Amino acid sequence: MLDIKVLGTGCVNCIKLENLVKEVITENNLPANVEKITDSEKFMDYGVMITPGLVVNGKVLAMGKIPTKSTLEHWLINMMGK
């Protein structure tokens, strides 16, 4: 199961990233737990200084940008070991 954290304060791009993550895991039937972290003090726990941030299984995959849908699919499928 993927442990996905979307880091952001609620800005437009943070919401877009969260929705994109949910879309990709649904379309690819990936087992995942998606958590939205809005507390900016917790961002530093992951080394994320610019939002939106994407952390999957403890690894920061994106910071300050939204990956393309195909890139996100590639990352998540590879993290699942498929």
Image (cartoon, rainbow, N blue to C red):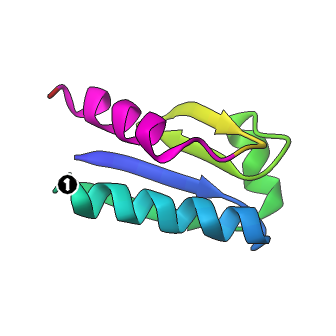
Left or right of residue 31, residue 60 in this image: right
**Quadrant (top left, top right, bottom left, bottom right) of the C terminus:** top left
Residue 37 visible from this viewpoint: no
Boundaries of the magenta span: 66-81
Left or right of residue 73, residue 82 in this image: left
Residue 73 visible from this viewpoint: yes
Q: Reply above or below: 20 against 82.
A: below
Query: Main structural element of the magenta stretch: helix, strand or loop?
Result: helix
Q: Nearer the viewer, residue 76 or 39?
A: 76
Residue 47's spot in the image, x, y percent?
A: 75, 33
Residue 13's spot in the image, x, y percent?
A: 73, 62
Q: Reply above or below: 75 against 54.
A: above
Residue 68's quadrant in the figure? top right
Q: Reply above or below: 72 against 12.
A: above
Residue 5's spot in the image, x, y percent?
A: 52, 53
Q: Residues within 10 Å of mark 1 (few under 14, many from 20)?
A: few
Left or right of residue 71, residue 46 in this image: right
Residue 9's spot in the image, x, y percent?
A: 78, 68
Q: Residue at x 59, y 41 (%)?
A: 67
Residue named by callout 1: 31
User: Does residue 54 show up magenta in the picture?
Assistant: no
User: Does residue 75 show up magenta in the picture?
Assistant: yes
